[in-house]
Amino acid sequence: MKRRDFVAMIVGGATVSPLIARAEQGTSIPRIGYIDPETRSAGIQGLLAGLEALGYVDGRNIKLIKSQFAAPTAADMRAAIQAIIREVDVLVVSGTVGGVAAKSVTSEVPVVFISVGAPVDIGLVKSLAKPGGNMTGISFEAAEETYAKRLQLLKEIVPDVSHVAILGAAGDPNFGFAMTSLKRSAPSLGVSITPFEIESADELGQAFDEMKRAQAQAVLVVAGYLTYSSIKKTADLALNYHLPSCHGFKEAAPAGALISLGPDLVSLGRQGSRLVDKIIRGERPADIPVEQPDRYVMSINLKTARLLGITVPPSLIAGADEVIE
């Protein structure tokens, strides 16, 4: 773009994205940083595929800057973000802990979060329609009632259940949000709930020991990066302890859990790529509404049901998006 054309656009009242203007003037291209808690996590896979579908090519019209860390802790995530924040024009983070960490590191760099539970409740944005700050993104939960629905599914599959263990990561904001929802819904279902928090996957065995001592009859797993990264281990332990389990990640049922209800993480990443595109084109995160998952997927593992001696109601099987035989 020639300088006189660029000035004319400004004088004429038209707006142009600083990122696009900078690229058109040949000074640099938009730098997109992302925090990947594992090698090509599902959300990041969706993000990168979505950016490619929108015509973005690393090294040509965007520059991708990646930071990878080992543990899903607030301290590690803050360190990972701090390591690249001065190098990026837009930052993408996955998960609730990542979103909270980004909030603590920067109030200026535009941030797109993917798969964050209750972004308003935990203070990332002022509202879903008008985020109001430097952050926007894709929520993991469409509504607080989603956890109530998961508890209801357990009750439908195991009508006699009266005591459910709630498993989640200590310090994860998702856990408090989930417990608030479950405390409201449990009495109407005739269920008592007991929280069990873990610091790492190494504590899962001890947690299940404690569940059995507490006479829990089923377990509901709160969605979070720690519980996502230990899906298989959690599903195996639940089966070994003869506890029907319900998870927030759709990948859990194929891994051996009894039932799961959750969004497609790859799809969430693709949704996030569209928000990154809007920011590159000049929109402010403050004005970009937070999106909710396009759809939820309910998966049921009938093999696990048989091993637990459970007969899944035909109505639930008919309503499932995925049935594992």
Image: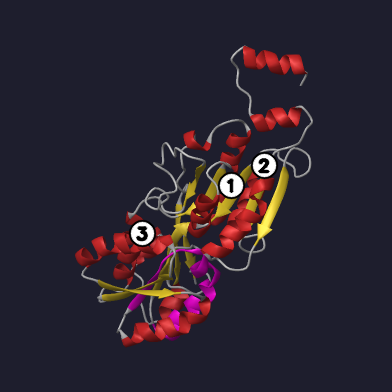
Q: Is residue 92 magenta?
A: no
Q: Using the numbered discs, state the Cα–Cα distance from disc 3 to disc 2 in whole angstroms.
A: 34 Å
Q: Is residue 158 above or below residue 139?
A: below
Gap between marks 1 and 3, in whole Å? 25 Å
Mark 2 sits on what residue? 53
Part of the protein shown in magenta: 218-242
What type of secondary structure mainly makes up the magenta span? Answer: helix
> Image height check: is 226 above or below 125?
below
**Residue 321 % position (x, y):** 46, 58
Is residue 241 highlighted in magenta? yes
Tell me the quadrant of the picture where the N terminus can be found: top right
The answer to whether residue 271 is seen in the rendering is no
Of the two numbered discs 3 and 2 on the same chain, state the one appearing first in sequence.
Answer: 2
- Which circle, 1 or 3, is nearer the viewer? 3
Q: Nearer the viewer, residue 244 or 37?
A: 37
Q: Residues within 10 Å of mark 3 (few under 14, many from 20)?
A: some
Identify the coloring: secondary structure
The residue where tag 3 is placed is: 177
Amino acid type of the residue that numbered disc 1 sits on in the rendered structure = Arg
Is 228 left or right of 57, judged from the image as shown?
Answer: left
Q: Amino acid at mark 2?
A: Ala
